[in-house]
Image: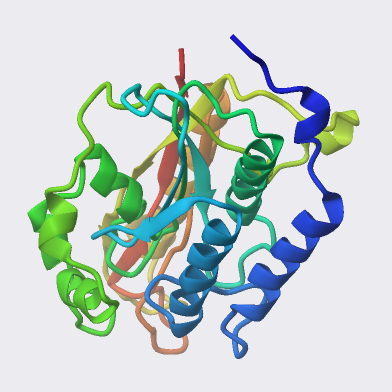
Amino acid sequence: MSLVDPALLAPEPERVAAAIAHLAGSYTESAQPGWTRRLFSDAYRASRQWTLAHMRDAGLEARIDAAGNVVGVLPGRDRSAPPLMTGSHTDTVHGGGRFDGIVGVVGAVEVARLLRESGRPLARDLVVVDFLGEEANPFGVSCLGSRSIAGLLERDHLDRIGEDGTRLGDAMTAFGLDPAAAVGQAWAPGSLHGYVELHVEQGPVLQDSGTAIGVVTAIAGIDRLLARFSGRADHAGTMPMDRRHDALAAAAAAVVAIEREGAARRCTASRPWVGSRPSRARSTSCPTAPGCGPSCARPRRTG
């Protein structure tokens, strides 16, 4: 077996930095804060064409699949062998970070480019993927592209309705995708040799310890829950405290309990948002607080 000299795989920092700067800075929703490139936005559409061209420029056989994943393949010596996959995503949340996801895509393309230039192909194909729509979105179905590949994108998902009343399947079609095919394009179990992803930490641990890079031993499996708290609006000055039914106070107690349980169980627990209907001045909070959405990310061993 011939191995690739590691010296031949040293990335070119200037090239990587330029690609990250271009993708992050040139394809963003200019009226929004930070780096904003949300699912189905014009900025996101344009960025995917750039990513496709970037993969092809690096020598990858690249295409966009039915679910909108940008998939590039660097042929290996045995094309019948299960391939190795790497990549990440390039969409962002509103006001997102510059490097989230992008580092994993641009870094993967850089590795593929260096492997091709070395003249030493891998034993198997290397697949580089920019997964469509990894971040949360108004339809409540995150990780759209990877769900499709894993066979976890279901037809019922296509009927989810966004904040503007648009159906997810219709939004996918308007974006140039094929939602019916996306539901049916799952890769067979065992068809991949392995998967590896480069990602920014999005936390302070490595930086605080002066560590340049770490290897993940567990990931957060996210559960999102929506709770509705119902109460009664009363006069803020005369209703006795022990007779009040304040929905927002109950929601606040739930938030504190979630944080306490998360700390006790050594997992992360967050409260994305709490919404309350407007209340009249000098009254206790509204009868309903419909938007308490706690989520608990439990550590799950990766093996």
291 or 300, nearer to the observer: 300
Q: Give the answer, above or below, for where 6 lies relative to 174.
A: above
Q: How many numbered marks does the figure carry?
A: 0
215 or 50, nearer to the observer: 50
Q: Give the answer, above or below, for where 76 lies relative to 38.
A: above
**Residue 259 placement (x, y as % from top left):** 53, 39
Outermost residue on the front side: it is: 119
- In this picture the colour scheme is rainbow
Q: Residue at x 61, y 56 (%)?
A: 102
Viewed as shown, does residue 74 lie left or right of 192? Answer: right
**Residue 288 placement (x, y as % from top left):** 28, 69
Viewed as shown, does residue 48 lie left or right of 138? Answer: right
Q: Residue at x 63, y 28 (%)?
A: 120
**Residue 268 placement (x, y as % from top left):** 54, 35
Residue 244 visible in the shown view: no
Residue 279 visible in the shown view: yes
Q: Residue at x 27, y 70 (%)?
A: 232
**Residue 214 placement (x, y as % from top left):** 72, 26
Viewed as shown, does residue 12 lie left or right of 127? Answer: right
Viewed as shown, does residue 253 lie left or right of 225? Answer: right
